[in-house]
Amino acid sequence: TFQKLTQDRELTVVYFGGSVTAGYGSSDSNEYSWRALIGKWLSAEFPNARVNNINRALGESGTYLGANRVQMDIIPAKPDLLFVEYSINDRYYKSTYEKAASQFETIIREVKAALPDTDIVTILVTDQRCLELNREGKLHIQAQAHEDIAKAYNIPTIHAGRYLAAVVDYSTANWSNYAIDIVHLNDAGYKIYYQIIREFMYNSLFCTDFLKPQEQFVMSPIISDDLFDGDRTYIIPSQDLLAKSNALGGAGVTWTNESIFSNAAISEKCGRFQFGDD
């Protein structure tokens, strides 16, 4: 990331996660979400570099869907810096430790196999129900799975959720000052996440001696008993194929080019296709 900002003067940042990364709850997710604030901070600190911020967050998604999307939505974007935030949705899907670890490890390995120079940062957020765990210095099991995998691959983890819990003084009564529900934050809450992520980025970019030889990434042996595998090739029908299908009495599926990476599209569309009323 430092090399891209200072030598190549162009950095591609991809934000991969659920609705907390998308910025649901903020007054304007492209202005006040933590990802938007980090993107603006990078541009301000490195004015001579072009920073390309790519939002690949999708509400209600955990590592199960993330592992399915990584080949289509992440690797082709060729991120130099990738933020991954999925642990809270893995909790909501009640993933076991083993499943959360396996699916998160799949994402890490596939990104690093295709793009070994990509810097990855793991973001662990929280919700109102986890405040007591935060107070005790613990993580819910899905977040612990992500942190253990990240550690095995020498990938940094930012405990944004613990920082937010400390700011709200572990108080459920105070939570509403920073959030619109149990997990989605308002502008003030996202600013707290941004502050701790910014601190990490500042220390990494400005307090590191890059003149010293840097360790090269070495792929860790597989940690999980098995990885998320199988054929995950996406087959997206063309308009012509859909037209022929409909002529033969198809199911009434129509093509749309609308992006799936917006809350409006997510609520109205199923994947990339609009299904008929019947």
Image: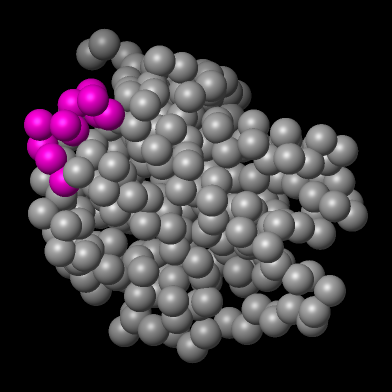
Relative image position of residue 70 (x, y in whole percent):
51, 54
171 inside magenta stretch: yes
Find residue 81 and report its image quarter: bottom right
> Quick one: 224 or 71, which is closer to the camera?
224
Placement of 231 over or under 93, stated as above or below: below
**Residue located farthest toward the top when viewing the structure as drawn:** 277
Placement of 251 over or under 41, stated as above or below: above
15 inside magenta stretch: no
Quadrant where the N terminus is found in the figure:
bottom right
Residue visible at 20% across and 66% down in the picture: 138
Left or right: where 258 falls relative to 78: left
Q: How many marks?
A: 0
Find residue 188 and report its image quarter: top left
Relative image position of residue 128 (x, y in whole percent):
15, 41
Quadrant where the C terminus is found in the figure:
top left
> Quick one: 275 or 223, which is closer to the camera?
223
Q: Does residue 198 appear in the picture of this structure?
A: yes
Placement of 1 over or under 48, stated as above or below: below
Q: Does residue 246 appear in the picture of this structure?
A: no
Relative image position of residue 182 (x, y in whole percent):
17, 34
Residue visible at 44% across and 71% down in the picture: 150
Left or right: where 87 falls relative to 70: left
Left or right: where 185 falls relative to 198: left
Give the magenta range.
170-180
> Quick one: 196 or 27, which is closer to the camera?
196
Q: How is the image coloured?
A: one colour
Left or right: where 169 falls relative to 49: left
**Residue located farthest toward the bottom when viewing the structure as drawn:** 221
Residue visible at 40% across and 38% down in the picture: 192
